[in-house]
Image (spheres, rainbow, N blue to C red):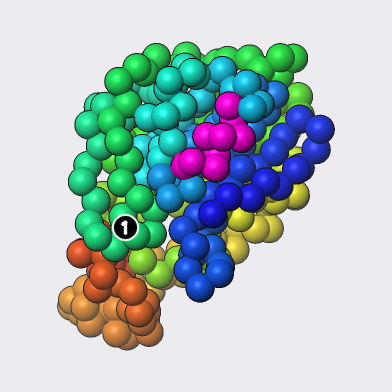
Amino acid sequence: MFEIDKFNDRVRGLKTATEYEGKAIMWTYAYLIDNVLFDAGCVNGMSELNEYTMKKGVERVYITHTHEDHVGACSVLSKYATIFAKPQHIPSLKSPPQYSEFFVWIWGQPDPVDKITTMDDEFDVGDLLFRVIDLPGHCHDTMVGFYEEDKRWFFSADGVPVPSRKKIAMQDENVVQVLETLKMIRDMDIDVLFDSHRGPIKEPAEHIQKRIDWLTEIQINAKELHSQGLSIEEIQEKLGLKVPWYLNATDERFGVFYLIKSLLLDS
C-alpha cells in the first residue's frame, strides 16, 4: 500500500505498508522534502513509492537506520538517487539480514544496495540545513535523526516508541538508552516531530513524556521486584505485562522479557 500525506508545501509523508483485509497493517513514513527523501519505506510498498519518487526527481536518500521498514526501496532508488548512510549502517545495507516469514509478510525482504555514500554530520536541502543526531537504544548500530534548527523540525525515525505504553523490545534494543534518547528529544527545541509511524506531531513534549513516564515506572517497579529475588518471568507476571497475540510469530526477535531484562541490566 502507498499513500501521500502533505504536511506543507515542502514536506510530504510517503506512507508504505502491507495491505491486509483492505487496511494497512502498520504504516511507515518516508519523508520527502523537495528532491530529497528521508528513509525508503518497506519493500511491500516499494513499487508505488518508487514510481512517485521517480516522477518527483528524487536525487538523494538519507537513511536513519537499517530496519526493513525503513530501507525497503533503497535497492531501486539507488538506480537514480544517491543513498547516504552512516558508516555503521553500510554493512547491513550491502548485505541485509534474512528476515523470517512473519516479517517478510509484514514489511518485505530488502535487497542488497551496491552504491552507498557515507553521510556527513550536516547536509542541506535547498535553504534548509539538517544536523545529524545520534539516537542510541533502538538498535545496536546507532540510529540517527535529522534536525532543522531554524524550522524546529526533527525527523526522529523510531526514536519515540509508537505505543505510549511500550511492552516489548527487540533482542538488541537497549531500553535504558531509549529512555535517555527520549529525554534528549523532549528537551530539544522542537516545533514538529516527524515520527516514522505516527506522522508529524506538533508540540511533541507531552507525547514524549508519556513514554518516559511509562518506561520509568516499569523500571522502578522491576528493580524493586528484582531486589526481592523475583526472576524476569515472575516480574513480567507481577507487572501484568501480557504477551501480544503476534509475539510467537516473531521468532524471538521481540519479547516482553527483553524489555524487562534491558531495564534491569543495561546501562
Nearest the viewer among 104 and 238 is 104
Residue 8 drawn above or below residue 24: above
Q: Main secondary structure of the magenta part?
A: helix
Residue 219 drawn above or below residue 74: below
- Residue 149, image quadrant: top right
Quadrant location, the N terminus: bottom right
Task: Look at the numbered disc 1 and give the secondary structure of its residue.
Answer: helix
Q: Residue 87, position in %: x, y?
A: 33, 21
Q: Amino acid at mark 1?
A: Phe
- Classify residue 8 as left or right of residue 182: right
Q: Tell me if mark 1 has few (under 14), some (14-19) or many (20+) residues whose alpha carbon lies within 10 angstroms of its own.
A: some
Which residue appears at 61% of the width and 43% of the height? 14
- Classify residue 22 as left or right of residue 3: left
- Residue 57, image quadrant: top right
Q: Residue 44, position in %: x, y?
A: 43, 50
- In magenta, the rendered stretch is 46-54
Is residue 48 shown in magenta? Answer: yes
Is residue 199 shown in magenta? Answer: no
Which residue appears at 61% of the width and 35% of the height? 52
Which residue appears at 75% of the width and 49% of the height? 202
Q: Which residue is mark 1?
A: 103
Is residue 167 shown to the viewer in this render? yes
Which residue appears at 26% of the width and 27% of the height? 94
Q: Residue 136, position in %: x, y?
A: 40, 39
Nearest the viewer among 39 and 222 is 39
- Classify residue 104 as left or right of residue 69: left
Residue 1 drawn above or below residue 134: below
Is residue 146 shown to the viewer in this render? no
Nearest the viewer among 79 and 261 is 79
Q: Residue 237, position in %: x, y?
A: 29, 84
